[in-house]
Image (cartoon, rainbow, N blue to C red):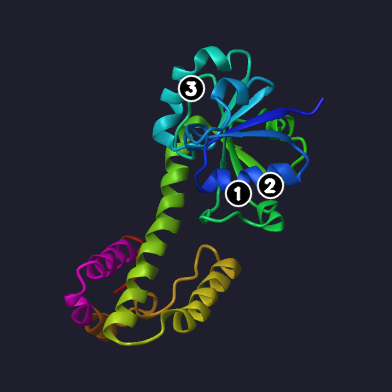
């Protein structure tokens, strides 16, 4: 018998996960505080026929929400999607993806890697049992490894996005240049370089130890308080890796 789900939340993850499960043929009921406040189903009704409750809510709310509604969740499988945290009595599957405000198309959703907690000696996980209708790639790490895994995801995603956003702002506001047509091809070349050589794709003056250019870059960034520290951090980290600068 296929699982019946109650999807809790209406944020970015839920906005994509709900349609994806529905289009995959899952029996699904949606619930959020906002929807209930606007006349939607009460939580008790939304989860009454579900055997699996999907907690697509913020990390800081998961444990408290589950405890608050322990009675109506009794006997149901609880699944959360936190990348950094583990919770007693719940299964965690983190989708490694930067979700937009709109729903991600089905074909793209099906390629997202889910990272779970623990696997058996044969390398099996419970993803297929929880989501038998989904064919997504999946892997698992230990609960103790999750904080480092998530920190790496934040660093490689959020730090890069912050840098790109600040660079785009300076290009547009101070140099009068269009950021997207200028930067998008460059950013794609960085992804191509990483894909081809994931452990050695650094290029530019830091990679080649071009001190004259580095000093010119640093001087130009003196007026950019959000960007200069990032360049300094790059130099420090590169030096620790033995890359001369």
Q: How many numbered marks appear?
A: 3
Q: What residue is shown at x 63% (from left), y 18% (from top)?
A: 76
Kindly state the secondary structure of the residue where label 3 is placed.
Answer: helix
Q: Quadrant of the N terminus?
A: top right
Q: Which residue is mark 1?
A: 16
Are the residues flagged by discs 2 and 1 in contact, CB closer than 8 Å?
yes
Q: Would you call the spot at circle 2 few (<14 residues within 10 Å), some (14-19), or many (20 or more)? A: many
- Magenta-drawn stretch contains 44: no
- Magenta highlight: main SS: helix
Q: Which residue is mark 3?
A: 66
User: Residue 77, how many percent across, how many down?
Assistant: 63, 22
Q: Would you call the spot at circle 1 few (<14 residues within 10 Å), some (14-19), or many (20 or more)? A: many
User: Residue 112, how many percent across, how many down?
Assistant: 64, 51
Q: Is residue 85 left or right of residue 44?
A: left
Kindly state the secondary structure of the residue where label 2 is placed.
Answer: helix
Q: Which residues are magenta?
A: 218-239
Kindly state the secondary structure of the residue where label 1 is placed.
Answer: helix
User: Residue 172, how many percent across, how many down?
Assistant: 34, 81
Q: Which mark is residue 20?
A: 2
In the image, 131 versus 113, the foreground residue is 131
Of pointers 2 and 3, the one earlier in the residue sequence: 2
């Amino acid at each position: 018998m296929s699982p019946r789900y109650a999807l809790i939340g209406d944020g970015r993850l839920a906005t994509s996960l709900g349609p994806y499960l529905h289009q995959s043929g899952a029996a699904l009921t949606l619930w959020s505080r906002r929807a209930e406040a606007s006349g939607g189903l009460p939580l008790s009704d939304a989860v009454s026929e579900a055997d699996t409750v999907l907690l697509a809510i913020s990390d800081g709310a998961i444990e408290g929400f589950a405890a608050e509604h322990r009675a109506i969740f009794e006997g149901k499988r609880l699944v959360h999607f936190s990348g950094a945290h583990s919770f007693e009595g719940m299964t965690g599957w983190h989708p490694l993806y930067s979700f937009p405000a709109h729903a991600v198309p089905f074909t793209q959703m099906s390629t997202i890697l889910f990272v779970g907690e623990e696997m058996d000696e044969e390398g099996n996980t419970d993803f297929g049992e929880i989501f038998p209708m989904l064919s997504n790639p999946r892997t698992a790490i230990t609960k103790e490894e999750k904080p480092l895994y998530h920190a790496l995801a934040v660093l490689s995603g959020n730090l890069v996005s912050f840098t790109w956003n600040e660079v785009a702002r300076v290009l547009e506001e101070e140099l009068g240049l269009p950021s997207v047509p200028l930067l998008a091809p460059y950013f794609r070349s960085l992804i191509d370089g990483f894909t081809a050589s994931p452990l050695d794709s650094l290029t530019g003056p830091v990679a080649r130890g071009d001190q004259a250019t580095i000093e010119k870059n640093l001087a130009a960034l003196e007026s950019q308080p959000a960007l200069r520290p990032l360049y300094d951090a790059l130099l420090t980290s590169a030096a620790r890796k033995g890359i001369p600068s």
